[in-house]
Image (cartoon, grey):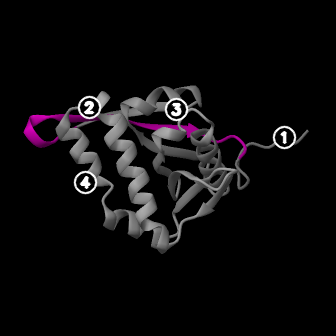
Amino acid sequence: MNIIPAKAADHETVRKITEETIRTVYPHYYPAGAVAFFLAHHNAAAIMRDITENCVFLCISDSGEITGTVTVSGNEIGRLFVLPLYQGNGYGRALLDFAESRIAEQYDEAELDVSFPAKPIYLKRGYQAVSWHSIETENGDHLCFDHMSKHLRNNITGGETNDT
């Protein structure tokens, strides 16, 4: 598997991964108004902005299939989606490992907003809830999520050292 930077030509691919994952997974956890909010939040313009800022990456399987995407901006992880067909095969773990490693080059801590379906994954990875949020969406529905963070101990620039 390989993780590569997304280019402008990959915009439609990133959008499709994002939309297909949200439309397939999120209705099992959120009401329709919240799902619509997620789709609007991860709109084409936001995706293109992040691509032009060199923040978006694609995960490519050993057979050459594009399986998922992640956005890394500063110390924040966002838009980590693996197509439903490929979930459970380690692609999400690889994307998260990549994001954390990239962040650890400059920051002590990784942060992200976490949806209900992803929360158990991040808890297992050592993330801690910092705050809880609720946004009112269409039809009086609510989008609830946690803001989480994780201390990255192996930070190259100022993290813990072992000077003995």
Query: Mark 3 = which residue?
Result: 122
Q: Amino acid at mark 3?
A: Tyr
Q: Position of residue 102 (x, y in %)?
A: 64, 55
Dot 4 or dot 2, earlier in sequence? 2
The answer to whether residue 157 shows anywhere in this view is yes
State the residue at coordinates (40%, 51%): 18
Q: Name the residue that disc number 4 marks.
A: 40
- The residue mark sitting in front, 1 or 3, is 3
Magenta stretch prevailing secondary structure: strand
Label 2 sits on what residue type?
Tyr
Q: Quadrant of the C terminus?
A: top right
Q: CA distance from mark 2 to mark 1?
A: 45 Å
| Residue 36: image location, x then y, percent | 22, 46
Q: What amino acid type should be assigned to the residue bearing mark 4?
A: Ala
Q: Nearer the viewer, mark 2 or mark 1?
A: 2
Can residue 29 be spotted in the picture? no
Comes first in the chain, label 4 or label 1: 4
The amino acid marked with disc number 1 is Asn
* Residue position marked by numbered label 1 in the rendering: 162
Query: How would you rate the neighbour count of disc 2 (Cα within 10 Å): few for under 14, some for 14-19, many for 20 or more?
Result: some
**In the rendered view, would you say 114 is above or below 17?**
above
Residue to which mark 2 is pinned:
30
Q: Nearer the viewer, residue 115 or 160?
A: 115
Callout 4: SS: helix
Question: Alpha carbon of mark 2 to alpha carbon of mark 3: how far?
Answer: 19 Å
Alpha-carbon span between mark 3 and mark 4: 24 Å
Where is residue 46 shown, x and y percent of the image? 34, 63
